[in-house]
Amino acid sequence: MEAIITLVVILGFILVALLGSSVRILREYERGVIFRLGRLVTLKEPGLALLIPVVDRMVRVDLRIVTLNVPAQDIITRDNVPVRVTAVAYFRVMDANHAIVEVENFLAATTQIAQTSLRAVLGKAELDTLLSERERLNEDLQKVIDQQTEPWGVKVSVVEIKDVEIPGSMQRAIARQAEAERERRAKVINAEGEFQASAQLANAADVMSRNPTALQLRYLQTLVEIGGTSKSSVVIPLPLDVMQPLLNQLNGHAAAQPGNPSVHEADEEQNRQHDQDSEQRPPDEDTADLAGVADTQPRDGDGGGDEH
């Protein structure tokens, strides 16, 4: 009797174990690929899945999006610049049957495909393109990787380049290039500003030349603007056309004064010139001059004879 009870208990445990192995529960994001005696039978949906003990075998497949960090890859760009690139890829399983049957490990396979595609695509681009056109390169990477993983039932939705590491010498060269470009732009903007300012100044000069009073008003306005600051020294320039009449009047007044040194100097120079001429004249000319003077004087006898 005891042996029968023991046998029943053992059979009960075996039955419970078999029932436990034949019942599976799948979550909403999971799918079950059923193999019966090694052959693919069907795909189980979320919920309760019943299996035939010992005969059926189920493989769970996660349909959620997987974040794949692509390891850093050393790449030589098209212009022979060594760079180190890291990227991230997002993919999910679209067909669970293909993901299990077509490839041994779809996660490892997708990782290797992402690495090789990253080196192949970025190796065809130049450094400037790699730094400035990442969106286009990301699209190219996504298309290349997705094309290769599509037969496995894996959909690669997004591929993003995370970081591009370049050598220090190349960083300094890029910095110098950017600095030179900034200086060129600054000089061009400065030249354009000076050109526009000169054009406006020329227009203003044309307007002011029609009315000289406008120039005087502008001059006074400038003095008012300069005088607004408390600590400033103002130098007032006067135009020559304003000062010329005053200078002429001052010169004429100075020449009219008797004690003017310039008048005395002129008289002395004239006397000195006359003395030099007198010294150079011959004696005969002096005697002739004196005789001529004597002849011109009236005689007493001649005057008396006329009176008689």
Image (cartoon, rainbow, N blue to C red):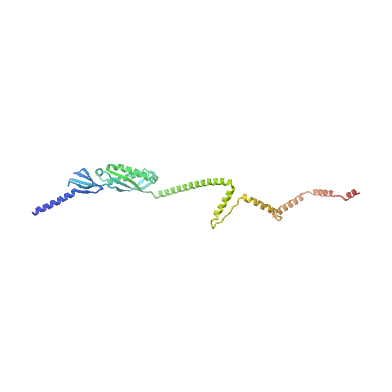
Residue 12 in sight: yes
Question: On the rendered structure, is 10 left or right of 287?
Answer: left
Q: Is residue 110 above or below residue 265?
A: above
**Quarter of the rendering containing residue 120:** top left
* Residue 231 percent coordinates (x, y): 54, 58
Left or right of 206? Residue 188 is: left
Q: Position of residue 296 (x, y in %)?
A: 84, 48
Instruction: Count all numbered tags in the image, as a single digit.
Output: 0
Residue 122 appears in the picture as rendered: no
Point out residue 301 in the picture as x, y percentages from the top left corner: 89, 50
Q: Quadrant of residue 142?
A: top left
Q: Looking at the picture, does residue 267 appear above or below residue 151?
A: below
Q: Residue at x 11, y 52 (%)?
A: 8
Closer to the camera in the image, 127 or 138:
138
Quarter of the figure that contains the N terminus: bottom left
Residue at image position (59%, 49%) is 213
* Left or right relative to 210: residue 96: left
Q: Nearer the viewer, residue 174 or 186?
A: 186
Is 116 or 261 nearer to us in this picture? Answer: 261
* Residue found 31% across the figure and 43% down from its top: 146
Q: Residue furthest bottom?
A: 231
The x, y position of residue 237, in whole percent, is: 59, 52
Write the residue at 29% across / 42% down.
Answer: 150
